[in-house]
Image: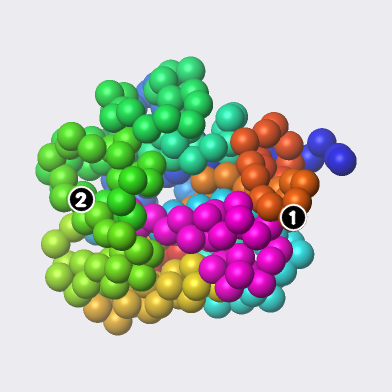
């Protein structure tokens, strides 16, 4: 196995979303993603967006994108960029999303293993709220995103299934009440743990994630004609196959650490 890791960490997502919305970026968090910063400048000329929508499908590894690139066609076509990104260690869901939305490493935010305490570290949600903006999370019950960002002055829409989550997310676009919407789907992660990353059941779940992202972007374009929007497809960590044909993650290895993100800007 080679030692080739992506150079841009998922911890840059927080500062990048703040920059997109023209909200002050704290000095103590990871710097913005330079590629997206250049895209913002090119498309918006330094102006901020009105809305940020970030979709978090769990466990979509860069190697899966490289091997099954054609499955991602619709995601690529509705985005401006496809970027390889680097996860954090240990590469497990609550640790990764904590770093993604705080902009700091696990040693700073405090989640360093698979546990789901409510974060006391400031997050992207807190910075939006402090700027007078409205934020919402749409997630499945019991999953990390439905747990670690609680106890904030924002709205939480928690459901039993990804299908219900996705339906509500599209409704929120119609309602046009929130400046920041974060959406979580864990179906690929759950399926690949049981059947392996490349099993038919797992790839079907991934196809569902890609189809929803494409539908979400189409909804943004059709319903938010008067808004500029920064949006993304932002997995937390990758995955690898283990003995017995099942899937896993959590190690400091390419398969678990390298993920694929897509980003776009609606002017």
220 or 195, which lies in front?
Answer: 195
Which residues fall within the magenta stretch? 182-206
User: Which SS class for mark 1?
Assistant: helix
Q: Which quadrant would residue 166 be assigned to in this image?
A: bottom left
Q: Is residue 177 left or right of residue 91?
A: left
Q: Residue furthest bottom?
A: 222
Residue that label 2 marks: 156
Question: What's the residue at 65%, 45% (across, down)?
Answer: 248
Question: Which tag is nearer the camera, tag 1 or tag 2?
Answer: 1
Residue 54 seen in render: no
Residue that label 1 marks: 245
Question: What's the residue at 48%, 61% (across, down)?
Answer: 187
Q: How many marks?
A: 2
Q: Are marks 1 and 2 in contact (CB under 8 Å)?
A: no
139 or 154, which lies in front?
Answer: 139
Tell me where residue 159 appears, x and y as whole percent: 27, 59
Tell me where residue 186 appears, x and y as whole percent: 46, 56
Q: Is residue 152 magenta?
A: no
Q: Is residue 191 magenta?
A: yes
Q: Residue furthest front?
A: 244
Tell me where residue 117 appears, x and y as whole percent: 33, 28
Q: Is residue 41 left or right of residue 142?
A: right
Of callouts 1 and 2, the N-terminal one: 2
On residue 136, which mark appears? none
Tell me where residue 176 appears, x and y as whole percent: 17, 67
């Amino acid at each position: 196995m080679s030692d080739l890791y992506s150079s841009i960490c998922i911890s840059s997502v927080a500062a990048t979303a703040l920059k997109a919305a023209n909200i002050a970026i704290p000095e103590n968090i990871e710097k913005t993603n330079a590629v997206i910063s250049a895209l913002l400048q090119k498309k918006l000329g330094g102006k901020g967006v009105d809305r940020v929508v970030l979709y978090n499908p769990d466990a979509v590894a860069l190697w899966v994108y490289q091997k099954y690139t054609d499955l991602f066609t619709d995601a690529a076509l509705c985005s401006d960029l496809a970027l390889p990104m680097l996860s954090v260690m240990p590469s497990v869901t609550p640790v990764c999303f904590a770093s993604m939305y705080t902009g700091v490493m696990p040693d700073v935010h405090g989640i360093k293993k698979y546990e789901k305490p409510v974060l006391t570290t400031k997050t992207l949600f807190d910075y939006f709220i402090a700027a007078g903006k409205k934020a919402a999370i749409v997630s499945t019950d019991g999953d990390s995103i439905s747990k670690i960002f609680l106890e904030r002055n924002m709205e939480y829409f928690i459901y039993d299934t990804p299908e219900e989550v996705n339906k509500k997310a599209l409704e929120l676009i119609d309602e046009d009440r929130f400046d920041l919407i974060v959406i979580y789907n864990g179906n690929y992660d759950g399926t690949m743990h049981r059947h392996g990353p490349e099993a038919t059941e797992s790839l079907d779940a991934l196809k569902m994630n890609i189809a929803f992202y494409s539908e979400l972007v189409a909804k943004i374009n059709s319903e938010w004609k008067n808004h500029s929007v920064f949006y993304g497809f932002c997995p937390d960590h990758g995955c690898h196959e283990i003995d017995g044909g099942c899937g896993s993650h959590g190690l400091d290895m390419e398969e678990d650490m390298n993920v694929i993100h897509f980003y776009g800007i609606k002017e």
